[in-house]
Amino acid sequence: MAEIIENTENKTNENNEDSITMSKDEFTKKIQSETDKVRTEYSKQKKGLEDQISSLTDKIKELTPKEKTDAEKDVETRLHELEEKSKQADVEKKHYEFLNTLQSKNIPSSLHEYLKDDIDVEKFASVLTDIAKQSKINNGFEPVTHNSNTGVTKEQFNKMSYVEKAKLYSENPELYKTLIK
């Protein structure tokens, strides 16, 4: 039972026709052979893609963050607390150093509330001193506790009684000392 199958292929030139004659068994073997070639090529490509997917999956697993244990979370919490305390201690240290610098320059520490921590204390102290000097020059200095001379002469002092001398001593000890001499 050999049946003959004719296969006619049309090419770009209409006048050119090829015809092949083969038995059904040969035709089946030829189809099976070509199918095997395609399947083999497909299997190779599939295997290569599966390998690529596998390697990419491994890389994704490596790069994906892992779930942290309670101990790791606790360590991170403590580390964060220590860092915050360290920052706070640094701020306090700078503040105390700033106060000490102000006091060393005879600037009242109560002014620190109105000053920035990063000012040049040396320059500020010199400006403040210049302002104070200028104020003294402009306003002058008038002593409040300085008593004017009462006009007591040495002769008047010698004629005073003991009670009057004691009163003069309590009111104006400087004058009393000068008159005793």
Image (spheres, rainbow, N blue to C red):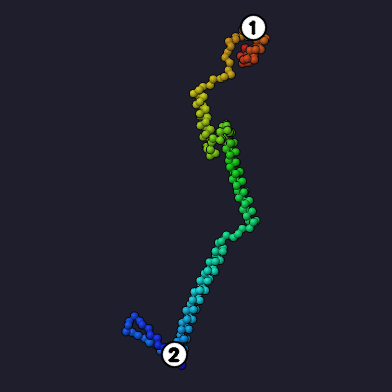
Q: With respect to residue 101, does 150 lie above or below? A: above
Residue at image x 45%, y 87%? 27
Residue in the foreground of this view, choosing between 117 and 41:
41
**Is residue 100 rendered to the left or right of residue 18?**
right
Q: With respect to residue 58, does 173 lie above or below? A: above
- Viewer-nearest of labels 2 and 1? 2
Specify whether residue 150 is in view: yes
Q: With respect to residue 98, does 139 lie above or below? A: above
Residue at image x 42%, y 90%? 4
Specify whether residue 181 is in view: no
> Residue 125 appears at what percent x and percent y?
53, 33
**Is residue 169 rendered to the left or right of residue 138?**
right
The three-letter amino acid code for the residue at tag 1 is Lys
**Is residue 146 rendered to the left or right of residue 28?**
right
Residue ID for mark 2: 23
- Mark 2 or 1 closer to N-term? 2
